[in-house]
Amino acid sequence: MIPVKSYAAYDATNPLKPYSFERREPGPNDVQIEILYCGVCHSDIHTAKGDWGPAIYPLVPGHEIVGRVVKVGSEVTKFKAGDYAGVGCFVDSCRTCANCKAGEEQFCEEGMTGTYNSFERGTEIPTYGGYSTGITVDESYTLRISDKLNLSEVAPLLCAGITTYSPLRHLNVGKGHKVAVLGLGGLGHMAVKFAVSFGAEVTMLSGTPSKEADAKSLGAHHFALTSDAEKMLSLSNSFDFILNTVSAAHDYNFYLNLLNTNGTMIVVGAPPAPAQIPAFTLIMKRRSIMGSLIGGIAETQEMLDYCAEHNITSDVEVIPMDYINKAYERMDKSDVKYRFVVDMASLK
């Protein structure tokens, strides 16, 4: 077994603190990774606090993992020691259902095995995430990371990146489309970068006036303040797509009215309460509302390769591991531009 240092939530209410445990030695198909950086996702906070259901404590969060391969199993073909590798939101799936066979393991009919707060398939061994010094993962669920990009800025692509890339690609968003991005945070800033890169005309919708300069610097062509009633009215029936990243309570109907005929709202945020959507808001313009999760392994690799080719990374603030509780407090106040990333060297 491989000794590992980490930070973990021991319960739903107290701060994260150091936790030591052991990873498995690499099997024939496994890759052992020394974790260099791990992004901090808002879902880490929700899971640690038990907001999304019972948590398996001690819980080691982190599913935006970038590191260096230190050892591979005898049958591994895609990686060798010294390569950079990444691990996203899941580390296994059933591999046999229709979704897994289609390369959409995130929708595994048995349920994907989360990088943390899950059990290794067929066992009662908890999975532990990337707030740790190392991880062992099947090569089929491990991603190749280019050395062309800053590794700390690559880490959030494993969640925030693929969460926004996947639905835009699924809908073939590109030149000639008008896209609005609702909410400028960890997800929103990546949505702007991808939509602009794909050739769409992009408008940032935000309730914070000071974010206009940031939106423009990220590449957004336009900015609209959501509290400006006259401006919002002028944008009625304007957009082909709205990528909704907001996880706080908000009025879906208000924004659906900004969609044109056949327009689609893509929901990637997870508000705490169900939305109320009048049927006529959809019926009268044949509008749609769809949800999207992350991407499968193949699509996530495609996204990483695209980012390497087009020099796209996340805007990050790198922190030491012992800053994590302060980082959680700041994230709850939206005080980060736009993703915290833990430098795991600080834990060694």
Image (spheres, helix red, strand yellow):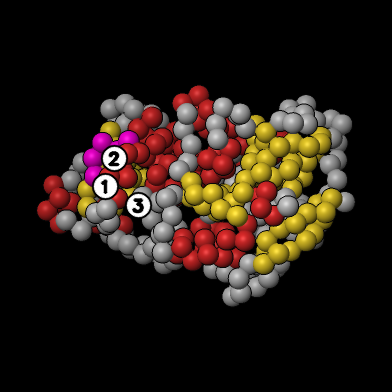
The kind of secondary structure element at disc 1 is helix
Mark 1 and mark 3 in contact (Cβ < 8 Å)?
Answer: no
> Quick check: is 252 in the magenta stretch?
no
Mark 2 residue type: Lys
Number of the front mark, 3 or 1: 1
C-alpha span from label 3 to label 1: 11 Å
Residue 267 visible in image: no
Mark number for residue 183? Answer: 3
Mark 1 residue type: Glu
The kind of secondary structure element at disc 3 is loop
Nearest to N terminus: mark 3 or mark 2: 3
Mark number for residue 289? Answer: none
Mark 3 residue type: Gly
Q: Is residue 179 left or right of residue 6?
A: left
Q: Which residue is mark 1?
A: 212
Q: Residues within 10 Å of mark 1 (few under 14, many from 20)?
A: many
Q: Which residue is mark 2?
A: 216
Residue span colored magenta? 219-223
Q: Main secondary structure of the magenta part?
A: loop
- Residue 312: give x, y in percent of width and height: 46, 33
Look at 49% across and 66% down and name the residue there: 329
Residue 341 visible in image: yes
Look at 84% across and 50% down and name the residue there: 2
51 in relation to 5, above or below: below
Mark 2 and mark 1 in contact (Cβ < 8 Å)?
Answer: yes
- Residue 285: give x, y in percent of width and height: 23, 45
Of residues 347 and 80, the one nearer the viewer is 347
